[in-house]
Amino acid sequence: MEASTSKRTRPRRDADDGTDTVDEQRRQMALRHVRQYPDPVLRVPTDEVTEFDEELAALVERMASIMGDAHGIGLAAPQLGLRLRLFVYQPEEGMAEAVVNPKITWSSDETDLDEEGCLSLGDAVRVPVRRPVAVKVEAQTVSGKPKSWDLDDYYARVFQHEIDHLDGVLMIDRVEGDEFRSGAMALLRPRP
Ligand SMILES: [Zn+2]
């Protein structure tokens, strides 16, 4: 999931030291690794991770670095073209944690509607998505240890968005209301 624009450093062309421009360049470089809609890999359900080895640890490191540079709050393996049931998210600024083989074991009946963005759908597409306010998630860590999360509000939303990616589901599939859906689809139409 993409960080909201307010949380993101916007490039300022008048910056004296060029820091913001460098940051934006790094973001654009990272986004080149992220598969973009309508890449079919974003629609393929993933397979459970079975090997908790050095290769997995290296993949998690790579995902964390791309997520950080791209200013994402979460990044799922299919977004890098990999059919693996795994995502990384940012529990705190500058941190990253892997969530491997996640399952939602409980969702609240209460839902709320909030805007989401996605690193695979471009900056322009931000849509309101209704989701349960709270969820419980069981998963494994990068070393294969069981771990569970009791989440509400923002992180409940981040986890549900990322777990959707692992099932081949995108936020645009969950948009309520024809006007938002057609607005988002118009922005996603391939440009000449
Ligand atoms: Zn996404």
Image: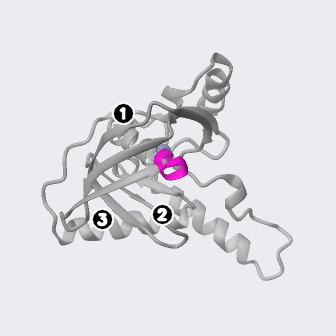
| Highlighted magenta segment, given as a residue range | 152-157
**Amino acid on which the number 2 mark rests in the picture:** Gln
| Residue 30 shows in the view | yes
| Residue reaching furthest to the left | 50
Determine the residue positioned at 16% across, 68% down: 53
Asked if residue 33 lies in the magenta stretch, the reply is: no
Please name the residue that numbered disc 3 is placed on. Answer: 59
Residue 166 sits in quarter = top left
In the depicted view, which residue is nearer to us: 142 or 71? Answer: 142
**Residue marked by disc 2:** 90
Q: Which residue is mark 1?
A: 43
Residue at 32% in and 65% down:
60
Q: Earlier in the sequence, mark 2 or mark 1?
A: 1
The answer for how far apart the CA atoms under marks 3 and 1 are is 21 Å
Q: Nearer the viewer, residue 148 or 121?
A: 148
Badge 2: how crowded within 10 Å, few (<14), some, or many (20+)?
many
Quadrant in the picture for the C terminus: top right
Q: Is residue 118 above or below residue 146?
A: above
The residue lying furthest to the top in this view is: 178
Whichever of labels 3 and 1 marks the residue nearer the N terminus, that label is 1
Tell me which secondary structure the magenta stretch mostly adopts. helix
- Front: mark 2 or 1: 2
Pick whichever, 59 or 167, lies toward us. 167
